[in-house]
Image (cartoon, rainbow, N blue to C red):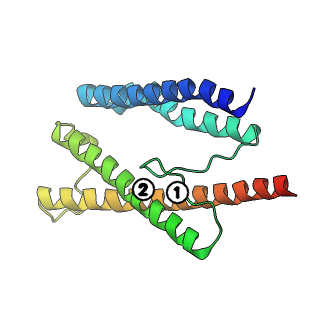
Amino acid sequence: MDERQKLNSVKPLAITVAVTYIYLLVETFYKFISTKDIFNCTWEIGLLVLMPIIICVVLRSEKEVMIPNTLSGKEIDKNMTPKAKSNRKRSYLFDSILFAGGLTAASIAVYCFGVKDAIDIYLIPNLSESASMMVSFFLEFTGLFIVSYLADYIWGEHSVKQYNKIINEFDD
């Protein structure tokens, strides 16, 4: 099977996985908001976590290196120059801001839909509810941003190094 045939056979599978992932996300949010109990969503959350792990394990066993894409769909720069690394860091920063903003917006939506007891906004006891809520969501955004940036940076740089290592092996 040549590369074009392989790509044509993988595309429908990737679309199926993406649609399934979106369905699981929607179902998880719907179940959580309607029942106000996170334990009703354990199978969905388990699958949401398991799917990317399985994909990574299979790709690793096939000795394929996936160069991470930005959220806009562009591949990150694979060069090892300082300028390329700076561009990758900027890409990780932008993606982390979008990721943290999206999840924080989802938390705000869950809070607004009446699942107020699911989110502990009273971190600082002497603040009003609105001030405590703002502090809570700010801390959530900050934590998600830091974790996302570190994960993107470590994963992206590791993937670029692996990619360049494999390319250098083919060149030799």
| Callout 1–callout 2 Cβ contact below 8 Å | yes
**In the drawing, what numbered circle is on residue 95?**
2
Mark 1, Cα crowd under 10 Å, few <14 / some 14-19 / many 20+, is many
Q: CA distance from mark 1 to mark 2?
A: 8 Å
Amino acid type shown at disc 1: Asp
- Res 10 quadrant in image: top right
Residue 109 is situated, as x and y percent measured from the top left of the image, at 22, 42
Left or right of 89, for residue 132: left
Q: Residue at x 65, y 54 (%)?
A: 159
Q: Assign a secondary structure to mark 1.
A: helix
Q: Assign a secondary structure to mark 2.
A: helix
Q: Residue at x 29, y 27 (%)?
A: 30
Question: How many numbered discs sit on the rendered protein?
Answer: 2
Residue with the mark numbered 1: 152
Q: Nearer the viewer, residue 158 or 124?
A: 158
Q: Residue at x 75, y 37 (%)?
A: 62
Residue 91, compared with residue 115, is above or below; it is below
**In the drawing, what numbered circle is on residue 113?**
none
Residue 1, compared with residue 107, is above or below; it is above
> Which quadrant is the C terminus positioned in?
bottom right
* Residue 155 visible here: yes
> Which quadrant is the N terminus positioned in?
top right
Q: Residue at x 49, y 51 (%)?
A: 74
Residue 79 is situated, as x and y percent measured from the top left of the image, at 64, 65
